[in-house]
Image (cartoon, grey):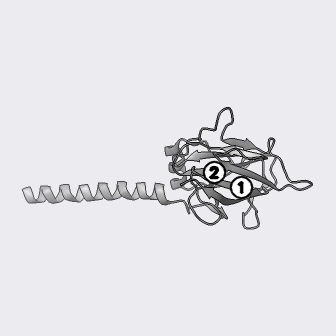
Amino acid sequence: MLKTVLLVGLTLAIALGGGAGSVLYALNHSASFGAIRVGPWVAFPDVGTPDADPYMQARYAREGSLALGRAEGVEFRASVDTQNQPLSIQCRYAVEGETPPARFWTLYATDENQVALKGIGERAAATSSLAILREAETTRFVVEVGAEPASGNWLPVSGTGSMQLVLTLYDTPLANRSASDTNLPAIRRIACDG
């Protein structure tokens, strides 16, 4: 009798533990479900739509993120540079290139927990298409990301640890099509402090 109770208890513990563990694994490592990748940038364009898979919906609900619908835009995140090296707050980067057509876009930095980084002084760790300086007669731009002031476009970040860059394109036709023919800015490491 005691042996049966112990076996049932062990079976339940394995089933519940395995089930909870598999759900946590799927939520933390299911970045490839519904993702589109363009260089170092990753987006989930279906997240704010009825087409979103249950894991994607659960991940966004757990994070408390507000998802954009297809008609609103698409959010790209990068946690690595173009050379596939993790982004670090202690390094300086050049985000360079151009964005796909969009009515408006924003670029900001977060920590690994997706909390917006603090800027330096009065400058926020964010910029937008309205505040950016572009190359003469083109749509190309360069934004330097780092703690040291830079001429031109500068996105100041402070702190330590890893970071992510978030590029959000609003009112863009990209949300309704494949990203295979899309160009997004490259993220080039310039230097690291330590």
The quadrant in which residue 124 appears is top right
Q: Return the residue nearer the eye: 183 or 83.
A: 83
Q: Return the residue nearer the eye: 17 or 122.
A: 122
For the residues labelled 2 and 1, say whether their Cβ atoms are less than 8 Å apart. Answer: yes
- Residue at the spot of label 1: 95
- Residue at the spot of label 2: 165
- The label on residue 112 is none
Q: Position of residue 191 (x, y in %)?
A: 63, 57
Q: Position of residue 10 (x, y in %)?
A: 20, 58
Q: Secondary structure at mark 2?
A: strand
Left or right: where 119 falls relative to 63: right
Labels 2 and 1: the sequence-earlier one: 1
Q: Return the residue nearer the eye: 135 or 101.
A: 135
Q: Position of residue 22 (x, y in %)?
A: 39, 59
User: In which quadrant will I find the N terminus?
Assistant: bottom left
Q: Amino acid at mark 1?
A: Val
Residue 150 in view here: yes
Q: Residue at x 59, y 45 (%)?
A: 110
The quadrant in which residue 26 appears is bottom left
Give the mark toward the camera: 2 or 1.
1
Inter-mark Cα distance, 2 to 1: 10 Å
Crowding near the residue tagged with mark 2, few <14, some 14–19, many ≥20 C-alpha atoms within 10 Å: many
Q: Residue at x 59, y 41 (%)?
A: 116
- Return the residue found at the far front: 194
